């Protein structure tokens, strides 16, 4: 899967993506750049982010990258302000950044819990807060928070992550109400187990492949491009009356 539907409303639109240097985020940057959007992205992985921006520099609008620790709100706000100077106001936000590091209940410290929720939940709120003035001035926008089916499946072994992802869906519904008066839509894109390079390297085994095959109704690998296809639709005007909803892309697992 390498091609996407074209959405004319996304051309020249300011799009901000968190965690855009690798994995699903990298595919999102590629997909929105191919639509002719003004893409800006933030990631802690500086080398990977700079390489991606350079590789896509021939797009209608060269993607703009800022290296920042988005779990630090001051750093996050500074990165958004710097990117806005280069791309103009943002009418689309994709809160994609996350870290699904496995952790046992017995080994989870308060410091780890705070660090995990900062990247998996906290940044989603403060990024939305930062782009709210842009979207109000533009008369509308689309915010896409990223969830996970992990908590729906009662997956153990990473309580801080699953709790954050469950909370992200609550955040979506709250912000959809608060932002809706300004014509801003807020939805949650909920991926299943996406076969990124990281997942294949760290977590996917022959045993888990059997688990996926048993769980999904469509027994094919779920790829980052499948997630990007839904993200494009939710960002475009074609989803103009979709808000406060969960859009699950998981091959029919939950």
Image: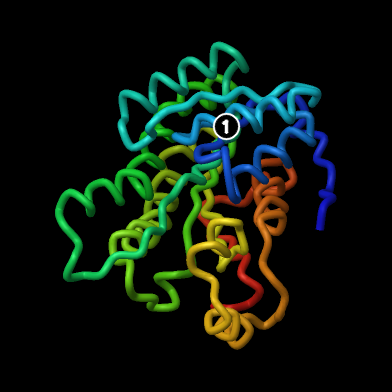
Residue 190: x and y in percent read 54, 61
* Point 47% across, 58% down: residue: 147
Relative to 165, is 218 above or below?
below
Of 50 and 38, the residue lying toward us:
50
Query: Image quadrant of residue 158?
Result: bottom left
What secondary structure is found at the residue carrying circle 1?
helix
**Residue 229 falls left or right of residue 115:** right
Coordinates of residue 184 in the picture (x, y in percent): 54, 37
Residue drawn at 62 percent across, 31 percent down: 15
Which quarter of the figure has residue 168?
Answer: bottom left
Q: Who is closer to the viewer here, 203 or 235? A: 203
Residue sitting at 63 percent across and 80 percent down? 216
Decide: few, some or many residues near mark 1? Use Cα within 10 Å; few <14, some 14-19, many ≥20.
many
* Whole-percent x, y for residue 1 in the image: 81, 58
Rendered view: 18 above or below 155: above
Q: Which residue is located at x 53 percent, y 80 percent?
A: 208
On the rendered image, what quadrant is the C terminus found in? Answer: bottom right
The residue furthest top is 85
Q: Is residue 39 visible?
A: yes
Disc 1 marks which residue? 49
User: Tag count in the figure?
Assistant: 1
User: Which percent across, then down, holds residue 106?
Assistant: 17, 70
Does the rendering let one see residue 140?
no
Q: How is the image coloured?
A: rainbow
Q: Is residue 122 above or below residue 207?
A: above
Would residue 83 be found to the left or right of residue 30 on screen? left
| 237 or 34, nearer to the observer | 34
């Amino acid at each position: 899967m390498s091609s996407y539907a074209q959405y004319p409303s996304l051309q020249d639109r300011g799009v901000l993506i968190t965690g855009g240097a690798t994995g699903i985020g990298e595919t999102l940057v590629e997909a929105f750049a191919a639509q002719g959007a003004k893409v800006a992205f933030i990631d802690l992985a500086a080398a990977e982010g700079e390489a991606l921006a350079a590789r896509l520099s021939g797009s209608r609008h060269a993607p703009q990258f800022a290296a920042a620790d988005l779990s630090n709100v001051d750093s996050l706000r500074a990165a958004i302000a710097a990117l806005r100077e280069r791309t103009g106001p943002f009418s689309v936000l994709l809160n994609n950044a996350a870290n699904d590091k496995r952790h046992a209940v017995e080994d989870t410290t308060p410091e780890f819990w705070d660090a995990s929720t900062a990247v998996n939940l906290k940044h989603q709120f403060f990024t939305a807060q930062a782009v709210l003035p842009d979207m109000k001035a533009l008369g509308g926008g689309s915010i896409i928070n990223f969830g996970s089916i992990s908590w729906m499946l009662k997956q153990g072994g990473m309580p801080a992550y699953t709790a954050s992802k469950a909370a992200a869906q609550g955040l979506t519904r709250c912000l959809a109400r608060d932002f809706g008066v300004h014509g801003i839509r807020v939805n949650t894109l909920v991926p299943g187990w996406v076969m990124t390079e990281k997942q294949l390297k760290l977590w996917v085994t022959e045993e888990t492949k059997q688990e996926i095959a048993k769980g999904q109704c469509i027994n094919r690998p779920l790829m980052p491009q499948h997630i990007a296809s839904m993200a494009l639709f939710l960002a475009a005007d074609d989803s103009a009356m979709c808000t406060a909803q969960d859009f699950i892309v998981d091959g029919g697992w939950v």
